[in-house]
Amino acid sequence: VIFKMAAPESRARKVFIHPVVLFSIVDGYERRSEDAKRVIGTLLGSVDKTSVEIRSSFGVPHNESEDEVAIELEYAKSMFDLHKKSHPNDEIVGWYATGSDVTEHSLLIHEYYSRETSNPVHVTVDTTLKGSRMGVRAYQSSKMGVPGKTEGTIFSPIPCDVILSGPERVGVNWLQKTKNTAKQSISPLSDVQHVSSAS
């Protein structure tokens, strides 16, 4: 038996993801409905010959049962159209899901994103914080199977790094400084306090 993998179409060698994307994914996960096990969404950015840069994302409402996935496609399209108005150079580059693994439903969702962009990236974000770390993994799909017979799809991992611009680095550094401090209550300054602190 000969197994054949289809020639990958412009496979990325590396995925770069901005921290704001991770914050958005975690925020969506924390706000999910009680019966939702995970959240999914669209990844936006750009693709060049060797890499994918993910600069933004938005969650997409969906329902999953044991044998089907229902995605609100009109919502996804409306959100992308709105995003394009403020970021005309961003394109759909893939999709994300919370959790540590690619699931059986991932292929169904991936098929939708494959219609929206060529060879989409699938990013998983493990929000369980195993080992006090948030696991972030990126994948692209490849067709495989016996020629003329059964075909399947596998998700191959791609190296994924968090990339920071100048302002993002400042924000992340401040967050890291406060992560081990005790919780504090902060109240807004009054107008008088603003004036006196400015002088």
Image (spheres, rainbow, N blue to C red):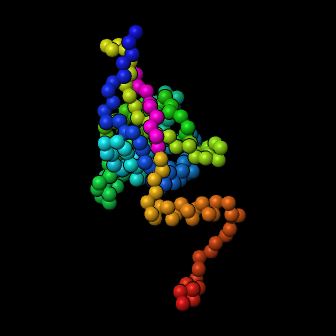
Which quadrant is home to the C terminus? bottom right
Furthest residue in direction top, as rendered:
1
Give the percent coordinates (x, y) of residue 176.
Answer: 60, 60
Camera sees residue 176: yes
Q: Residue at x 52, y 29 (%)?
A: 66
Q: Which residue is drawn at 59% across and 80% down?
A: 189
Q: Is the magenta stretch mostly helix, strand or loop?
A: strand
Q: Residue at x 61, y 47 (%)?
A: 133
Q: In this view, does 143 lie above or below 101?
A: above
Give the percent coordinates (x, y) of residue 44.
Answer: 37, 49
Q: Is residue 65 above or below residue 81?
A: above
> Is 85 left or right of 152, judged from the image as shown?
left
Q: In which quarter of the image is residue 127?
A: top right
Q: Which residue is drawn at 31% across and 13% down?
A: 148
Q: In this view, does 53 lie above or below 11?
A: below
| Magenta span of residues | 150-160
Q: In which quarter of the image is residue 146?
A: top left
Give the percent coordinates (x, y) of residue 35.
Answer: 57, 41
> Is 84 left or right of 173, judged from the image as shown?
left
Question: Does residue 193 belong to the magenta stretch?
Answer: no
Which sits in the foreground, 109 or 140?
Answer: 140
